[in-house]
Image (tube, grey):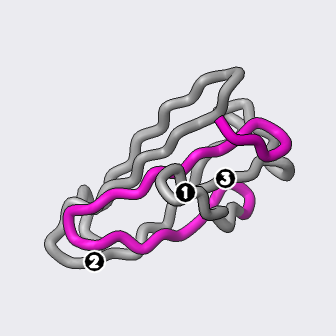
Amino acid sequence: MEAGVVEGEVIAKERVGTLLVVSNLAERKRTAEVTVNLTALRRPVGRTSAENALTGQPIDLRQGAFQTELGPFTYALGRQFRGAHRRL
């Protein structure tokens, strides 16, 4: 994958959860392989769930890693929750 084509940003709030933005800056679709350091974010590795922040669909989060398909010049938003799943 070309360097700098897929970019990510993490916004973490201790009592609420984490918002992850993953952007594809390329003219072609991409599969983004995303790994989030849950320990650094103080999230429980085995008990943290996530969902697509736009659709509400669950994200298959395994040890802080997941894959997402991104169209050209598009983005994905993911939410992680502290402990058990809950809506914001």
User: Residue 35 lies in what quarter of the image?
Assistant: bottom right
Name the spot of residue 69 as percent of width and height, x first: 42, 74
Given the image, on which type of amino acid does mark 3 rest? Ala
Label 2 vs 1, first from the N-terminus: 2
> Mark 1 near mark 3, Cβ–Cβ under 8 Å?
no
Label 2, on which residue? 29
Q: Residue at the location (74% across, 52% down)? A: 49
Residue 63 as seen in the image, left or right of residue 10: right
**Residue type at mark 1?**
Asn
Which residue position is annotated with label 1? 52
Q: Which residues are magenta?
A: 62-88
Q: Residues within 10 Å of mark 3 (few under 14, many from 20)?
A: many
In which quadrant of the rendered view does residue 6 lie? Answer: bottom left
Question: Quick check: marks 3 and 2 in contact, CB under 8 Å?
Answer: no
User: Split into 4 quadrants, where in the image is the C terminus?
Assistant: top right
Front residue of 29/53: it is 53
Residue type highlighted by circle 2: Lys
Q: Of 87 and 34, which appears nearest the observer?
A: 87
- How far apart in space, not on screen, are marks 2 and 1 (Cα)? 18 Å
- Counting the numbered discs, the total is 3
Q: Earlier in the sequence, mark 3 or mark 2?
A: 2
Q: Residue furthest left?
A: 27
Q: Position of residue 75 (x, y in %)?
A: 33, 57
Mark identifier at residue 25: none
Mark toward the viewer: 3 or 2 = 3
Q: Is residue 75 above or below residue 38?
A: below
Q: Please tell me which residue lies in front, 83 or 34.
A: 83
Please indicate whether residue 29 sits to the left or right of residue 43 in the image: left
Q: Which secondary structure, mark 1? A: strand
Mark 3, residue position: 50
- Quick one: label 2, few (<14), some, or many (20+) residues within 10 Å? some
Residue at image position (49%, 45%) is 20
